[in-house]
Image (spheres, rainbow, N blue to C red):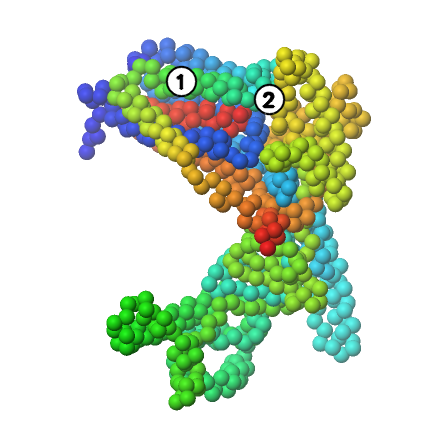
Amino acid sequence: MEIPYTVTARKDTGLFNAKVGIWLFLASEVMLFGGLFSAYVFLRIYADYPWPERALPIVPGLINTFVLIGSSVTVVFAWASLKMRQWRRFQIFMAITIGCAAVFMVLKTIEYKAKWGHQAVRMDDFTIIEGHAHYATILSDGKVEHFHTKNEAKKAGEKDAEVANKAAVAAKGKDEESGGSGKANLWKAGKPFKANVLLFKPETIDFSLVRAHESWVNAMLEQTGKRNSKLITAEDTFLYGHIEDYSGIKSDPRSSKERARKEAELVKEYATAEEKRDHKFGENSLFIPAGTPLSYTLLEKARKVFVAGRAHNAETRTAILREKWKSVRRDLPDEKYWDQAPEARIDSATDLAEEVDEEGNCTVGSKVVSLVSTLSFRMDPPQPIIIKRSWIKRPVKGQDGRAELRDDTSLNAGDGEGGSTGLLESPLALSVDAIDFRWMAQKAEEAGNVPMEVIEQSWIFSKANKNGSTYKKIWKVHKKRIAELEQRLIDKYGKDEEGKPKRVATETDRYRVTWQDFVHYARAEHDRLMPGDSGFDDLRPKFWNGFAGPNHKDEEIHKLHAFPELEIPHHKVSLQSMFTPKWNTYYAIYFTLTGLHGLHVVGGALVLGYYLFFSKGLYRSDPEWLANRVEIGGLFWHFVDLVWIFLFPILYLM
Amino acid sequence: MADTPEEIKKAQKKYLLIGLILFVFTVVTVAVATVPWLDFGEHGFDARDATIGLIIATIKAGLVGAIFMHLSHEKKTIYVLIVIGILMGISLMGLTGWAFGDPIKYGNSVEGDGFFNPEAKAEQH
């Protein structure tokens, strides 16, 4: 079939069809991006926190702008080459265009990666701390140690395991000599993890059958296995329900003989009240003996029984209630239903009992089954469990020896009699590359306080912070530098009639110590310079330094110890996140806009790549058609460039 | 429309020139935002900086549209499509504007419910 108007123009529109098509599509794209841009505007206007102005590293964005503008020129040249029937030239320009798209995506990836690996913390007093989280490892004695890098943590973990295992083997030898059945319990060095988690040493863990989250259960199982511990059911549990699957007993790992014995014991225990009940529920129940190891499948099976049991109970109650209503209506036909209602109630003592003797005493069982909604597992021996802060349901204080997760899992550290709170010291340890007091200043102003006073009384400068003096020193230099800046602005721009300076330092200048500031002050300290000294300003990193943000691996920064350590106590952390959409609405809209734009770049490059690599045949048979196709692809490409022309200033420069 | 090979040959120079102008404008935008003595308005970022940045961006976008996308000499159908698209885009922004009247502002405030603020929680009890 021949497609009409691929080369010649339609008379009514004066255009070939594909051009109308692409413009229709671009019009819809204008609406899509327009909507998102307006989302940006409204998020910014209504932000209840200080908006991160000029927060992104400019250089990658600037290079990307050049790259996209350049590719817009080359794609036009590729089209022009086809029009002039120069295939070779077309190939070159198209290849450059696609190369530009690749460069753009590589830079974008570098930028995203930097954001995804950068730790942000909001403290309970609204101090914002940014930096790189340290790494931690759990040693064989259950202690946790922090290290600057992953590698250091890994090495320390391995060394500890080696020492521990030597001791274990030696102990085994001794044990065997004295006639014991010595078994060396070898320790495996755990993977280093980022020091932004909670560590809890539970004795028991209760899982909710209805809500237990598979990946969290598996994460705990994995950790338990690694630390030579196991999670096993604390006691025999009998679950009743109305399902056909009686596979719980089958999955009991112990010998069938022992299983049979255990089962027989249980039946004996329940025998009096159970005869009838077994007839009713026996086949649909699940018996989980004490010592059954945890698995998500086991929880799933138990959940099936629970759900079935709950349905059975609901059905039973409904049926009883229906009967009640019938009899009440029969007995009191003239009453209104609201007067009948008090009579139509379930009396749990008699109505739910299966058999009631003449005196009204319940003799056998109950019509409803008792539901087991949580399964308790013992951790043997107790070992620290790593919990992500995002899993936690409510603050873990430690006093009550409990940690509750959002899937209703509860980690319990005994009954508290032994003084065990379960919560191990879990500070958020990081190398700080920015401190931001703007939000704290905003809150202070709202409360009618002087921001500077509030800031200087904050935890980070207090004695409670063991690195407090370092930050005090940095803050002193920072304040001095800002005072210098203010003086310079007065000298240059003067004061107005009321005697107020015409230009003043911004909130960001005042209340945010950026990574450039940290490096600047560290260099100045090294050279023994203070703000105001000649040469102090020259030490400041330039805007092109630190390609996609602060580089913690930089030799100079490392040597100067420019990014000091900080250990934020667990209870002072209000929100922790990487620089991801979760952190604040700015990053949410940043990732939405640039992510969607990035997808357009990839999609456009694929189409242009198709023209470059698979269109020689079309060029031979109908070069004008191919030229029109390239024009269409080019129009889309220009649009992608056009969107970036707006994205760059609003996200990087404003 | 530049359709004959001769015209296209001539147009190429124009494309290069526009590319160059776009490069220069990009440098200007960054300079205005980063070099202190080029900073208009207040010290640091302010509304005037935003306006200048957006004006430059709009000029750049206009150049890309008019020259690279040939909008300076297009058929009427396409103008109609674009105008409809832009009007619809603006209406969408208007729809977002309804958020102005939204009475629920701090309903899910994290400070209020005591999750992130143990002290607030303690006060409630």
Badge 1 amino acid: Gly
Check disc 2: other Cα within 10 Å, few if <14, some if 14-19, many if 20+.
many
* Quarter in which the N terminus of chain A is drawn: top left
In the image, residue A93 sits, relative to residue A441, either above or below, namely above
Classify A342 as above or below A598: below
Residue B32: give x, y in percent of width and height. Answer: 56, 17
For the point 76% across and 37% down, which residue is it?
Answer: A470
Which numbered tag is attached to residue B62? 1
Q: Give the tally of numbered discs.
A: 2
Q: Secondary structure at mark 1?
A: helix
Question: Which mark is nearer the camera, 2 or 1?
Answer: 2
Do we see residue A83 in this rendering?
yes
**Residue A611 appearing in the image:** no
Most extreme residue toward the bottom is: A358
Which one is nearer the viewer's eye here, A203 or A642? A203
Q: Chain of mark 2?
A: B
Q: Quadrant of residue A223?
A: bottom right
- Residue A587 position in % (x across, y down): 52, 36
Q: Quadrant of residue A158?
A: bottom right
Relative horizontal placement of residue B23, taking residue A163 as reference (left or right): left
Q: Which mark is residue B44?
A: 2
CA gap, disc 2 and disc 1: 28 Å
Chain letter of disc 1 in the image: B
**Which residue occupies 52% across, 75% down?**
A237
Percent of width and height locating residue A68 = 46, 24
Image height check: is B5 above or below A211? above
Disc with the residue nearer the chain's start (2 vs 1): 2
